[in-house]
Amino acid sequence: MARLSRERVLAAAVALADEAGLDGLSMRKLATELGVVPMALYKHVANKDELLDGIIDAVVSEIDLTPVDGHWKPAIRSRILTARQALLRHPWASGAIESRREPTPAVLAYMDSIIGLFRAGGFGVDEVHHAIHALGSRILGFSQELFDDTPADPDAQEQAAHAMAATFPWLAEMALRVAHDEKTVVGSGCDDQFEFEFALDLLLDGFERLRHAG
């Protein structure tokens, strides 16, 4: 058996979280996965909080931060969509990131790289500050959605939309007309990847107009 190390502990924790979610991740379960007693883990992670910080950094470190040349907009777009791919591989990661009071080192490094791309593109510090606020969590590849993402029966949803038509006509119209995508995670009828890129492109286009306006 390979010698226990911090890297091995974090890799096993990421795998366990991928399988069971954050609620299924505990020091005891992790120790069982590694074939050690729980106390052995504390030589490598001081507590559950440090473990969470470590697995967040393990996931965010999957994002390629290699310096890129060229126009700022495709560079930032590509980096954010790469971050989204990393977080989609680990569905628990967005919630873990939001749960931390302070950004972890890998998150800070990622944010620094995004700011650097804006600055290299000619944006002033104040402009970048506003852009970061506008992007919010989208900068890391995820967004807080308005609609419940719990899977539901399409026929039941259609009936509910018809039932609300008299009271909420515009909402019902949208619910009945949008195209359905069974793999969505942002509510029935929404293609989540399209919606993410649609909003991201709106923001990036707006930042470009801001840049040209000086």
Image (cartoon, grey):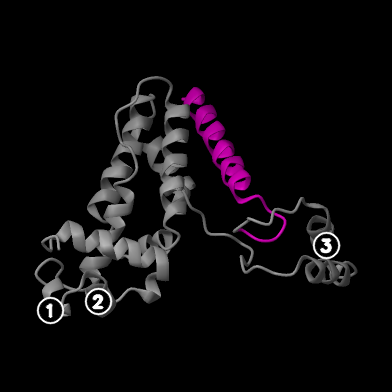
The residue beneath circle 2 is 32
Residue 121 belongs to magenta span: no
Which stretch did the figure color magenta?
Answer: 186-214
Residue beneath the point at 83% across and 62% down: 172
- Residue at the location (48% across, 52% down)? 142
Residue 57 place in picture, x, y as percent: 27, 54
Count residues near mark 1 (Cα–Cα under 10 Å), then give few for <14, some for 14-19, many for 20+: few
- Across and down, in percent, residue 115 comes to 34, 37
As helix, strand or loop, the secondary structure at mark 1 comes to helix
- In front of the other: label 1 or label 3? 1
The image quadrant of residue 109 is: top left
**Foreground residue among 52 and 181:** 181
| Amino acid on which disc 1 is placed | Met
From mark 1 to mark 2, how far is it between C-alphas?
11 Å
Can residue 5 be seen in this snapshot? yes
Residue behind mark 3: 172
The disc labelled 2 sits on which kind of residue? Thr
- In three-dimensional space, the C-alpha distance between marks 1 and 3, rounded to whole angstroms, equals 55 Å
The percent coordinates of residue 34 (x first, y second) are 22, 69
